[in-house]
Protein backbone atom coordinates (compact mmCIF):
# COMPACT_ATOMS: atom_id res chain seq x y z
CA UNK A 1 0.00 0.00 0.00
CA UNK A 2 1.47 3.34 -1.08
CA UNK A 3 -1.07 5.95 0.03
CA UNK A 4 -3.63 6.17 2.82
CA UNK A 5 -6.29 8.90 2.68
CA UNK A 6 -7.51 9.61 6.22
CA UNK A 7 -10.73 11.55 6.88
CA UNK A 8 -12.11 12.47 10.31
CA UNK A 9 -15.87 13.01 10.42
CA UNK A 10 -18.32 14.31 13.00
CA UNK A 11 -21.91 14.67 11.81
CA UNK A 12 -20.75 16.08 8.47
CA UNK A 13 -22.44 13.31 6.50
CA UNK A 14 -23.68 15.37 3.55
CA UNK A 15 -20.26 16.90 3.01
CA UNK A 16 -18.60 13.52 3.57
CA UNK A 17 -20.80 11.91 0.93
CA UNK A 18 -19.62 14.44 -1.66
CA UNK A 19 -16.03 13.87 -0.57
CA UNK A 20 -16.27 10.08 -0.83
CA UNK A 21 -18.07 10.25 -4.17
CA UNK A 22 -15.13 12.27 -5.48
CA UNK A 23 -12.75 9.62 -4.16
CA UNK A 24 -14.56 6.62 -5.72
CA UNK A 25 -13.09 7.12 -9.22
CA UNK A 26 -9.75 8.09 -7.72
CA UNK A 27 -9.76 4.90 -5.65
CA UNK A 28 -10.49 2.69 -8.65
CA UNK A 29 -7.79 4.29 -10.84
CA UNK A 30 -4.96 5.18 -8.45
CA UNK A 31 -3.72 1.69 -7.62
CA UNK A 32 -2.21 1.18 -4.18
CA UNK A 33 -4.64 3.42 -2.32
CA UNK A 34 -6.83 3.03 0.76
CA UNK A 35 -9.40 5.42 2.21
CA UNK A 36 -9.99 5.45 5.97
CA UNK A 37 -12.89 7.33 7.56
CA UNK A 38 -12.80 7.84 11.34
CA UNK A 39 -16.17 8.87 12.76
CA UNK A 40 -15.91 10.67 16.10
CA UNK A 41 -19.10 9.11 17.47
CA UNK A 42 -21.65 11.13 15.50
CA UNK A 43 -24.28 9.20 17.45
CA UNK A 44 -26.71 8.47 14.61
CA UNK A 45 -27.50 5.73 12.11
CA UNK A 46 -25.47 7.22 9.29
CA UNK A 47 -22.28 5.35 10.15
CA UNK A 48 -23.79 1.97 9.25
CA UNK A 49 -25.47 3.43 6.16
CA UNK A 50 -22.21 4.91 4.85
CA UNK A 51 -20.28 1.76 5.66
CA UNK A 52 -22.71 -0.18 3.48
CA UNK A 53 -22.81 2.49 0.76
CA UNK A 54 -19.02 2.68 0.38
CA UNK A 55 -17.80 -0.90 0.97
CA UNK A 56 -14.47 -0.22 -0.73
CA UNK A 57 -13.50 2.17 2.06
CA UNK A 58 -12.51 1.44 5.66
CA UNK A 59 -14.74 2.91 8.39
CA UNK A 60 -13.60 3.21 12.01
CA UNK A 61 -15.86 4.23 14.90
CA UNK A 62 -13.98 6.31 17.50
CA UNK A 63 -14.74 5.92 21.22
CA UNK A 64 -16.17 9.47 21.39
CA UNK A 65 -15.93 12.95 19.95
CA UNK A 66 -12.27 13.00 20.90
CA UNK A 67 -11.16 15.80 18.62
CA UNK A 68 -9.55 16.15 15.22
CA UNK A 69 -6.01 15.24 16.33
CA UNK A 70 -7.13 12.06 18.05
CA UNK A 71 -9.22 11.03 15.05
CA UNK A 72 -6.28 11.61 12.69
CA UNK A 73 -3.93 9.62 14.90
CA UNK A 74 -6.45 6.78 15.20
CA UNK A 75 -6.76 6.64 11.42
CA UNK A 76 -2.96 6.68 11.05
CA UNK A 77 -2.55 3.69 13.39
CA UNK A 78 -4.74 1.64 11.03
CA UNK A 79 -3.17 2.98 7.83
CA UNK A 80 -1.00 0.69 5.71
CA UNK A 81 0.37 3.32 3.34
CA UNK A 82 3.88 4.74 3.19
CA UNK A 83 2.27 8.16 2.68
CA UNK A 84 -0.73 9.77 4.36
CA UNK A 85 -3.18 12.35 3.02
CA UNK A 86 -5.27 13.87 5.81
CA UNK A 87 -8.38 15.29 4.20
CA UNK A 88 -11.36 17.19 5.58
CA UNK A 89 -14.81 15.69 4.92
CA UNK A 90 -15.92 19.02 3.41
CA UNK A 91 -13.45 18.72 0.53
CA UNK A 92 -13.66 17.09 -2.88
CA UNK A 93 -10.60 15.93 -4.79
CA UNK A 94 -9.69 14.74 -8.29
CA UNK A 95 -7.28 12.05 -9.42
CA UNK A 96 -5.07 14.75 -10.94
CA UNK A 97 -4.76 16.62 -7.65
CA UNK A 98 -3.98 13.45 -5.74
CA UNK A 99 -1.35 12.36 -8.25
CA UNK A 100 0.19 15.83 -8.37
CA UNK A 101 0.53 15.89 -4.58
CA UNK A 102 1.93 12.36 -4.54
CA UNK A 103 4.49 12.92 -7.33
CA UNK A 104 5.61 16.33 -6.06
CA UNK A 105 6.10 15.06 -2.53
CA UNK A 106 8.16 12.07 -3.69
CA UNK A 107 10.48 14.29 -5.74
CA UNK A 108 11.08 16.95 -3.09
CA UNK A 109 12.96 15.49 -0.14
CA UNK A 110 13.06 18.86 1.61
CA UNK A 111 9.26 18.92 2.03
CA UNK A 112 7.78 17.37 5.17
CA UNK A 113 4.18 18.50 4.61
CA UNK A 114 2.62 19.35 1.25
CA UNK A 115 -0.72 21.01 0.54
CA UNK A 116 -2.32 22.63 -2.51
CA UNK A 117 -4.57 25.53 -3.49
CA UNK A 118 -8.08 25.41 -2.04
CA UNK A 119 -11.20 27.25 -3.16
CA UNK A 120 -14.61 27.55 -1.52
CA UNK A 121 -18.20 27.59 -2.78
CA UNK A 122 -17.81 31.24 -3.82
CA UNK A 123 -14.82 30.43 -5.98
CA UNK A 124 -12.55 32.29 -3.57
CA UNK A 125 -9.11 30.84 -2.91
CA UNK A 126 -7.88 30.47 0.65
CA UNK A 127 -4.78 32.42 1.64
CA UNK A 128 -1.63 30.33 1.63
CA UNK A 129 0.76 32.90 3.11
CA UNK A 130 0.43 31.79 6.71
CA UNK A 131 3.01 32.70 9.36
CA UNK A 132 3.69 30.90 12.61
CA UNK A 133 2.19 32.74 15.59
CA UNK A 134 4.55 34.68 17.81
CA UNK A 135 4.26 37.77 19.98
CA UNK A 136 4.56 40.00 16.90
CA UNK A 137 2.17 38.11 14.58
CA UNK A 138 -0.43 36.74 17.00
CA UNK A 139 -2.85 39.69 17.05
CA UNK A 140 -4.38 41.34 14.01
CA UNK A 141 -2.91 44.80 14.54
CA UNK A 142 0.58 43.49 15.29
CA UNK A 143 0.37 41.08 12.35
CA UNK A 144 -0.67 43.83 9.93
CA UNK A 145 2.25 45.96 11.10
CA UNK A 146 4.64 43.02 10.73
CA UNK A 147 3.42 42.29 7.19
CA UNK A 148 3.71 45.98 6.25
CA UNK A 149 7.27 46.21 7.56
CA UNK A 150 8.25 42.99 5.77
CA UNK A 151 6.12 43.45 2.65
CA UNK A 152 8.89 42.97 0.09
CA UNK A 153 10.32 39.90 1.78
CA UNK A 154 6.90 38.26 2.17
CA UNK A 155 5.88 39.03 -1.42
CA UNK A 156 8.99 37.30 -2.65
CA UNK A 157 8.36 34.31 -0.39
CA UNK A 158 4.71 33.87 -1.36
CA UNK A 159 4.70 34.92 -5.01
CA UNK A 160 1.97 32.91 -6.81
CA UNK A 161 4.15 32.63 -9.93
CA UNK A 162 6.18 29.94 -8.18
CA UNK A 163 4.85 26.40 -8.55
CA UNK A 164 5.83 25.77 -4.94
CA UNK A 165 5.72 28.23 -2.07
CA UNK A 166 6.77 27.61 1.50
CA UNK A 167 4.51 29.10 4.18
CA UNK A 168 5.10 28.45 7.86
CA UNK A 169 1.97 26.32 8.09
CA UNK A 170 -1.01 25.05 6.11
CA UNK A 171 -4.58 24.23 7.09
CA UNK A 172 -5.30 20.71 8.30
CA UNK A 173 -7.94 20.31 5.57
CA UNK A 174 -5.25 19.02 3.17
CA UNK A 175 -2.07 17.58 4.65
CA UNK A 176 0.13 15.23 2.61
CA UNK A 177 2.91 13.69 4.71
CA UNK A 178 5.03 10.56 4.62
CA UNK A 179 4.62 7.92 7.30
CA UNK A 180 8.32 8.33 8.07
CA UNK A 181 8.02 12.06 8.81
CA UNK A 182 4.70 11.57 10.61
CA UNK A 183 6.24 9.03 12.99
CA UNK A 184 9.37 11.14 13.42
CA UNK A 185 7.35 14.09 14.74
CA UNK A 186 5.05 11.74 16.73
CA UNK A 187 1.89 12.60 14.83
CA UNK A 188 -0.81 15.09 15.70
CA UNK A 189 -0.68 16.71 19.14
CA UNK A 190 -3.69 15.67 21.21
CA UNK A 191 -3.36 18.71 23.47
CA UNK A 192 -5.76 20.23 20.91
CA UNK A 193 -9.39 19.23 20.57
CA UNK A 194 -10.13 21.39 17.56
CA UNK A 195 -8.11 24.09 15.74
CA UNK A 196 -4.40 24.99 15.88
CA UNK A 197 -3.42 21.33 15.73
CA UNK A 198 -2.41 21.99 12.12
CA UNK A 199 -0.21 24.92 13.17
CA UNK A 200 1.39 22.72 15.82
CA UNK A 201 1.95 19.87 13.35
CA UNK A 202 3.65 22.18 10.84
CA UNK A 203 5.85 23.71 13.53
CA UNK A 204 7.03 20.24 14.52
CA UNK A 205 7.85 19.51 10.86
CA UNK A 206 9.83 22.76 10.60
CA UNK A 207 11.64 21.99 13.86
CA UNK A 208 12.59 18.60 12.39
CA UNK A 209 14.38 20.34 9.51
CA UNK A 210 11.76 19.99 6.76
CA UNK A 211 9.75 22.55 4.80
CA UNK A 212 5.99 23.05 4.55
CA UNK A 213 5.01 23.41 0.90
CA UNK A 214 1.99 24.50 -1.14
CA UNK A 215 1.65 23.22 -4.71
CA UNK A 216 0.05 25.95 -6.84
CA UNK A 217 -0.40 23.92 -10.01
CA UNK A 218 -3.25 21.89 -8.55
CA UNK A 219 -6.29 22.56 -6.37
CA UNK A 220 -9.33 21.15 -4.63
CA UNK A 221 -12.69 22.32 -3.29
CA UNK A 222 -13.00 23.05 0.44
CA UNK A 223 -16.34 24.30 1.81
CA UNK A 224 -16.01 27.17 4.28
CA UNK A 225 -16.93 25.94 7.78
CA UNK A 226 -18.93 23.12 6.24
CA UNK A 227 -17.97 20.44 8.73
CA UNK A 228 -17.99 22.28 12.06
CA UNK A 229 -20.54 25.10 12.11
CA UNK A 230 -23.78 23.13 12.01
CA UNK A 231 -25.97 25.25 14.31
CA UNK A 232 -25.83 28.14 16.80
CA UNK A 233 -24.59 26.05 19.73
CA UNK A 234 -22.00 24.24 17.61
CA UNK A 235 -20.82 27.51 16.11
CA UNK A 236 -20.33 28.99 19.60
CA UNK A 237 -18.48 25.86 20.71
CA UNK A 238 -16.11 25.82 17.74
CA UNK A 239 -15.39 29.55 18.00
CA UNK A 240 -14.66 29.09 21.71
CA UNK A 241 -12.29 26.24 20.92
CA UNK A 242 -10.39 28.51 18.50
CA UNK A 243 -9.56 30.78 21.44
CA UNK A 244 -8.80 27.86 23.76
CA UNK A 245 -6.46 26.32 21.18
CA UNK A 246 -4.66 29.66 20.83
CA UNK A 247 -3.92 29.54 24.56
CA UNK A 248 -2.76 25.92 24.20
CA UNK A 249 -0.41 26.82 21.36
CA UNK A 250 1.01 29.77 23.31
CA UNK A 251 1.55 27.49 26.30
CA UNK A 252 3.28 24.85 24.17
CA UNK A 253 5.52 27.00 21.98
CA UNK A 254 6.17 30.50 23.37
CA UNK A 255 9.07 31.36 25.65
CA UNK A 256 8.14 32.19 29.29
CA UNK A 257 7.91 35.99 28.97
CA UNK A 258 6.06 35.94 25.62
CA UNK A 259 3.75 33.29 27.05
CA UNK A 260 2.69 35.53 29.95
CA UNK A 261 2.29 38.65 27.79
CA UNK A 262 0.39 36.96 24.95
CA UNK A 263 -1.95 34.91 27.16
CA UNK A 264 -2.78 38.01 29.20
CA UNK A 265 -3.46 40.13 26.12
CA UNK A 266 -5.60 37.38 24.62
CA UNK A 267 -7.69 37.00 27.79
CA UNK A 268 -8.44 40.70 28.12
CA UNK A 269 -9.06 41.28 24.42
CA UNK A 270 -11.55 38.43 23.97
CA UNK A 271 -13.38 39.07 27.25
CA UNK A 272 -13.81 42.77 26.46
CA UNK A 273 -14.89 42.06 22.87
CA UNK A 274 -17.37 39.32 23.78
CA UNK A 275 -18.78 41.31 26.70
CA UNK A 276 -19.48 44.32 24.46
CA UNK A 277 -21.02 42.19 21.72
CA UNK A 278 -23.08 40.25 24.26
CA UNK A 279 -24.46 43.49 25.70
CA UNK A 280 -25.29 44.66 22.20
CA UNK A 281 -27.12 41.40 21.50
CA UNK A 282 -29.73 42.26 24.15
CA UNK A 283 -30.56 45.42 22.22
CA UNK A 284 -30.67 43.66 18.85
CA UNK A 285 -32.55 40.52 19.87
CA UNK A 286 -33.00 39.16 16.36
CA UNK A 287 -29.33 39.32 15.38
CA UNK A 288 -28.19 35.68 15.51
CA UNK A 289 -24.51 36.52 15.03
CA UNK A 290 -24.51 38.69 18.14
CA UNK A 291 -26.32 36.01 20.15
CA UNK A 292 -23.47 33.60 19.45
CA UNK A 293 -21.17 35.93 21.39
CA UNK A 294 -23.22 35.45 24.55
CA UNK A 295 -22.67 31.70 24.34
CA UNK A 296 -18.97 32.18 23.62
CA UNK A 297 -18.60 34.50 26.62
CA UNK A 298 -20.22 31.93 28.93
CA UNK A 299 -17.96 29.20 27.53
CA UNK A 300 -14.84 31.33 28.01
CA UNK A 301 -15.67 32.27 31.60
CA UNK A 302 -16.07 28.56 32.41
CA UNK A 303 -12.80 27.81 30.65
CA UNK A 304 -10.78 30.52 32.43
CA UNK A 305 -12.13 29.44 35.81
CA UNK A 306 -11.04 25.91 34.94
CA UNK A 307 -7.56 27.17 34.00
CA UNK A 308 -7.24 28.78 37.43
CA UNK A 309 -8.43 25.62 39.14
CA UNK A 310 -6.39 23.01 37.26
CA UNK A 311 -3.39 25.07 36.06
CA UNK A 312 -3.56 23.95 32.44
CA UNK A 313 -4.52 25.77 29.25
CA UNK A 314 -5.53 22.57 27.47
CA UNK A 315 -9.20 22.23 26.55
CA UNK A 316 -11.14 19.88 28.85
CA UNK A 317 -12.37 18.24 25.64
CA UNK A 318 -8.83 17.34 24.51
CA UNK A 319 -7.52 13.81 24.98
CA UNK A 320 -4.39 15.00 26.82
CA UNK A 321 -6.35 17.09 29.32
CA UNK A 322 -6.56 14.54 32.13
CA UNK A 323 -2.82 13.86 32.23
CA UNK A 324 -2.18 17.62 32.57
CA UNK A 325 -4.70 18.33 35.34
CA UNK A 326 -3.12 19.02 38.73
Image: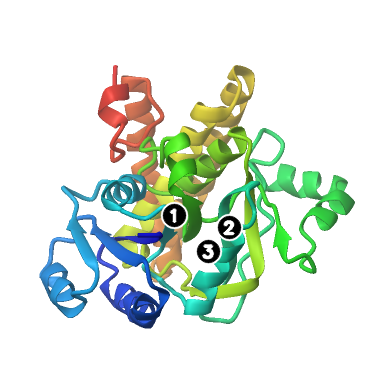
Disc assigned to residue 102: 3
Quarter occupied by the N terminus: bottom left
Mark 1 falls on what kind of element? strand
Crowd rating for badge 1 (residues with CA inside 10 Å; few <14, some 14–19, many 20+): many
Could you tell me if the residues under marks 2 and 3 are in contact, i.e. CB atoms within 8 Å? yes
Quarter occupied by the C terminus: top left
Label 3, label 1: how many angstroms apart (C-alpha)? 8 Å
Crowd rating for badge 2 (residues with CA inside 10 Å; few <14, some 14–19, many 20+): many
The number of discs equals: 3
Q: Residue at x 28, y 24 (%)?
A: 323
Could you tell me if the residues under marks 1 and 2 are in contact, i.e. CB atoms within 8 Å? yes
**In terms of depth relative to the viewer, which is nearer, 264 or 128?**
128
Residue furthest to the right in view is: 152
Earlier-in-chain disc, 1 versus 2: 1
**In terms of depth relative to the viewer, which is nearer, 278 or 112?**
112
Q: Position of residue 154 (x, y in %)?
A: 81, 52
Crowd rating for badge 3 (residues with CA inside 10 Å; few <14, some 14–19, many 20+): many
Q: Position of residue 187 (x, y in %)?
A: 41, 40
Q: Residue at x 71, y 61 (%)?
A: 164
Disc assigned to residue 211: none
Amino acid sequence: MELSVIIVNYKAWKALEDCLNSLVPVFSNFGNLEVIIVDNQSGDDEFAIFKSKFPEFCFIQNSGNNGFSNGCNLGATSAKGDFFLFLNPDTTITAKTLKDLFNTYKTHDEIGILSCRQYNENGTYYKQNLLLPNLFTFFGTFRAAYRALNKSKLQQKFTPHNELTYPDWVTGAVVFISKEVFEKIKGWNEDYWLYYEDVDLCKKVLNAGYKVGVLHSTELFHAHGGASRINLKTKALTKTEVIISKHTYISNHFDPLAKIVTNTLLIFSVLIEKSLLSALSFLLLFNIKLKVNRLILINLIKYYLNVLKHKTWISPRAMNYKQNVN
